[in-house]
Image: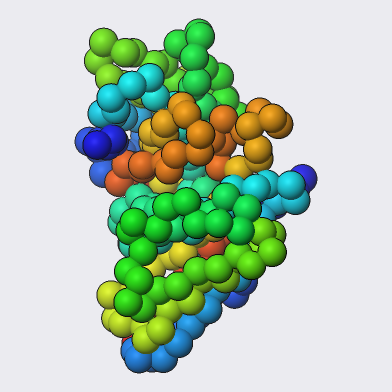
Amino acid sequence: EAEVAQSPRYKITEKSQAVAFWCDPISGHATLYWYRQILGQGPELLVQFQDESVVDDSQLPKDRFSAERLKGVDSTLKIQPAELGDSAMYLCASSPPPTRGGKNIQYFGAGTRLSVL
Amino acid sequence: AQSVTQPDIHITVSEGASLELRCNYSYGATPYLFWYVQSPGQGLQLLLKYFSGDTLVQGIKGFEAEFKRSQSSFNLRKPSVHWSDAAEYFCAVGGNTGFQKLVFGTGTRLLVSP
């Protein structure tokens, strides 16, 4: 069964350093999402891509976060500089296109657990 | 704005007993509703979904959920809980046009006692 791949699984960094997370969606999934999940809370959307275009980044802290999906396949989420409050699980998800019965069904990767010291 | 409320932060159920996890949503139109399960340190796995039609939907692992429009609820149930069901459960609401974002509740942690 195809899965959303994320790396690394765990990342420890010091505040003010730069970090990057990578996501490879399920093949053929045009829509890709990055969520942040703070401990004890549900995931919250940071950014949504349709192919290589950003369709929603209203909750992305743009002063320090950036995301790209240059070829419309895999994606990178970057934080620079990292702050203590960025410690969280970062989840990537993807959805198939409507013609393949997508209907907003999102498939999640295992996530990257970030700890900022 | 859409929102999801899961009023129970923790629930403890004896193995073999029945389970019901509550979910209430707020959405201005006909919603898409989802239940996901998350094991510690893992991503989210889709348990079931409601788009339209029959208000009782069946999912994986023996779970089911009932959509009640009049109560704005989408409660998750299982007739007999297994120890392996211990995890965090998230209810989510999404739009039924395009690929609108999912809004998640804060989750309910299920503990299963022997």
Q: Is residue B93 visible?
A: yes
Question: In the rendered view of the protein, which quadrant contains the N terminus of chain A?
Answer: top right
Q: Pick whichever, A40 or B114, lies toward us.
A: A40
Which residue appears at 60% of the width and 64% of the height? A69
Image spot of residue A106 (x, y percent): 56, 42
Q: Pick whichever, A102 or A110, lies toward us.
A: A102
Q: Is residue B34 above or below residue A49?
A: above
Q: Is residue B109 above or below residue A18?
A: above
Q: Quick one: which residue is furthest to the front in this view?
A: A53
Which residue appears at 52% of the width and 48% of the height? B44
Left or right: B3 as drawn, with respect to A3: left
Image spot of residue B39 (x, y percent): 50, 51
Left or right: A35 as drawn, with respect to B108: right
Q: Pick whichever, B27 or B38, lies toward us.
A: B27
Q: What is the image's colouring?
A: rainbow
Q: Is residue A5 visible?
A: no
Q: Is residue B53 above or below residue B15?
A: above
Please tell me in which quadrant of the rendered image residue A47 appears.
Answer: bottom left
Q: Is residue A61 above or below residue B55?
A: below
Image spot of residue B25 (x, y percent): 28, 29
Question: In the rendered view of the protein, which quadrant contains the C terminus of chain A?
Answer: bottom left
Which residue appears at 28% of the width and 35% of the height? B2
Which residue appears at 69% of the width and 64% of the height? A71
Image spot of residue A73 (x, y percent): 69, 59
Q: Please tell me how many numbered marks the rendered image carries.
A: 0
